[in-house]
Amino acid sequence: MRLFQLLSSPDKSLNLSLFKWSTLLAEARYMSMLGQLKPLLVKAHVWHKLPLKVQQTIESDFCVYANQRRLLSQESERLSSLLKGLNVDHVYLKGAAYQLAGYPEFDGRLMADIDLLVSRDSLPKVEAELLKSGWIFTKTNDYDEKFYREWSHEIPPLRHIERGTELDVHFNIMPVILKNSPSPALLQSKITPLPQLPSAYMLEPSALAFHSIIHLFFESEYNKGIRDLNDIYMLTKHFDGVDFWQGLIALEGEMGNGDCIYWALYFLRKIYSLSPPTYVLEHFDKCAPNKALAAILGWSFTQVFYQQYPPYRSKLHLVAAAILYWRGHLKRMPLYKLIPHLFVKGWRQFINKEEMTLEDVFRVR
Amino acid sequence: MSHKSYHLRSGPFLFEIDTPISIVQEHISSHYSHSLVQPSSSSFIDYHVTLNHGPLHRRLIFPQATFSFNHKTPFKPLPLTQAHAMLEWGMNWVISSTANQFLTIHAAALEKNGKAVIITATPGSGKSTLCAYLVSQGWRLLSDELALISPGTLEVHGLARPMNMKNKSIDVMKEYFSADSFSKVAEDTHKGTVCLLRPPISSLEKVLIPAAPALLVFIKYQPDEHCYVESIDKAKALVEVISNTFNFGLLGHKGFDICKRLIAQTDSVYIEYSDFEACKTAIENALTKSNQ
């Protein structure tokens, strides 16, 4: 059994041998999804019938989540009081938003960092205040500065000097360098306040799913593709209803990128047998790319969603990864900027690998 | 050399190790021969680990070894001659960063007369050396680096893996262990010169039997001190254990609760020593006292 099969039919995992479980859990660990399996298996009424070893392995990762969830509560309260003092409304995006909203489907889902959206006007004072409160930039050279601020949609990543939390401050939904980059104001108006956190917001249901979808299908690397696709599935299950689907159609009208929604629906139907209303499917079928492109992309996405775990990769996996790599970059950057950018990026990776040494890690904090 | 795959049982964990590196293959054959198992459909492989050669251009000049866990490479490569030490450190890292079903303390753990002794120290204070000495005197090795505490029973689970000897302690231990117990020496590592010492079969055979903790020892090697013993009050011992626990913060309230119960159940002593025999007697005395 593969991870995508477990995610769509958790009840079929009951008769797996311990050996098969260990392979399945290794794939889930690779995708950072181990802890997420607990609520899935509990809901499918199989959790309590699983072998102890399987429960322990999942539970152990769930502890990491529980700790992250605690830290997020503390961090969001601090950010809220800091930004309320500046009178800045801020919108939580992606993982942090799902957690703060308390959607039960997202229990166990790990976050790499906290993503926060503020308006571009408020950015200077937000940055100044964060730097005063112990947040530091982790990438500090001139090229990164230029890349993030002038071409992308966020400022360079921040890390808290004591707590080690990572924070990405966004000022747009999509890279600003794109000619057709939609105005951030469009999504910024589709927000709903988060309870108990002054001046903190998250996106409304349709906008939340829309943002998650364009992010996944603008990616150039799909190491956690199935995790992100699963997020979108859980959002559609959580919100399923006329308002949600019509909201998604309306957003596509305002902000374009219907092809991303087409692909999301295509794979949600294929993997999870999701059945959205016919008018939704008819609407987004019109956004499909031409047949030849659809065939190539469909094949490439299938490779990364089904077979991303290294032991499962086919000989052609590299081809699919390369197609999506170039597609993702070209979607986010015009070619004349992209070529020099990839060159700089490649060169810097070559001379400066960002990995830990053994001394750094085997140390009690 | 061709790729070889090993299934290695270390206490509660089953590792799958893939490597084409001959120094690692030799190390596994010489130091883990009693821990190797044949996997079946009922084996649960906890961790998949690979030790590989570094990039091609580094094969010829300053050859390197890389460590990966579950197909991801978390560390910078090390010189090829340190590959077997890298395996040991990497395995420690894998356990300490993922096994939250236990409270994981950075400590040596041994069993004597059914009771577990947990020994912590600041790095370079002779924890592993003392541990190896006690093993040579018939104590059972649980682990020289990680004490795994079961949250419910507080029992200490053993790993019974080779002990990490550093610098001078390598020569000191030659008196107590047979020559074939010592691995190839890895020079110029971040810990200096390192050698891995195979535990006796008696420790390996009982690796799956956990032991109830009775005594915590905070140790310091002090060349001009024969043996000084001081009993430690529970509050101080608690702070000491917490600061040596990898996943204390991660486990939240549960972590605090486990540490608190562990301290309530055990006695604690601080020992400065330069004489092995005297130190062993001091620990034995403290163990006897804790039983009363």
Image (cartoon, helix red, strand yellow):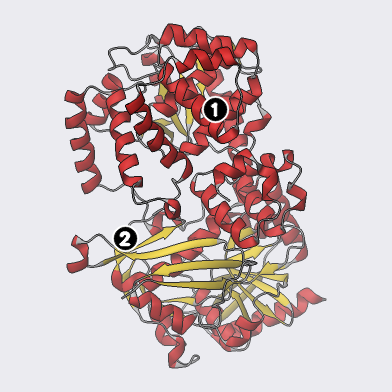
Q: Nearer the viewer, mark 2 or mark 1?
A: 1
Q: Amino acid at mark 2?
A: Pro
Question: Label 1 lies in what chain?
Answer: A
- Whether residue A229 can be seen here: yes
| Horizontal relation, residue B51 to residue A25: left or right | left
Question: Label 2 lies in what chain?
Answer: B
Residue at position x 44%, y 90% from top? B180
Is A349 above or below relative to A179?
Answer: below
Q: Which residue is mark 1?
A: A232
Question: 10 Å neighbourhood of mark 1: few (<14), some, or many (≥20)?
Answer: many
Report the front residue among B199 and A112. A112
Label 1 element class: helix
Q: Which residue is mark 2?
A: B77
The answer to the question of whether label 2 and label 1 lie on touching residues, with beta carbons closer than 8 A, is no
Q: CA distance from mark 2 to mark 1?
A: 37 Å
Q: Give percent across and percent down for residue B171.
A: 40, 86
Q: Give percent across and percent down for residue A347.
A: 19, 42
Q: Amino acid at mark 1?
A: Ile
- Whether residue A202 can be seen here: no
Residue at position x 38%, y 66% from top? B51
Q: Give percent across and percent down for residue B71.
A: 42, 55
Residue at position x 50%, y 15% from top? A90
Report the front residue among A233 and A150. A233
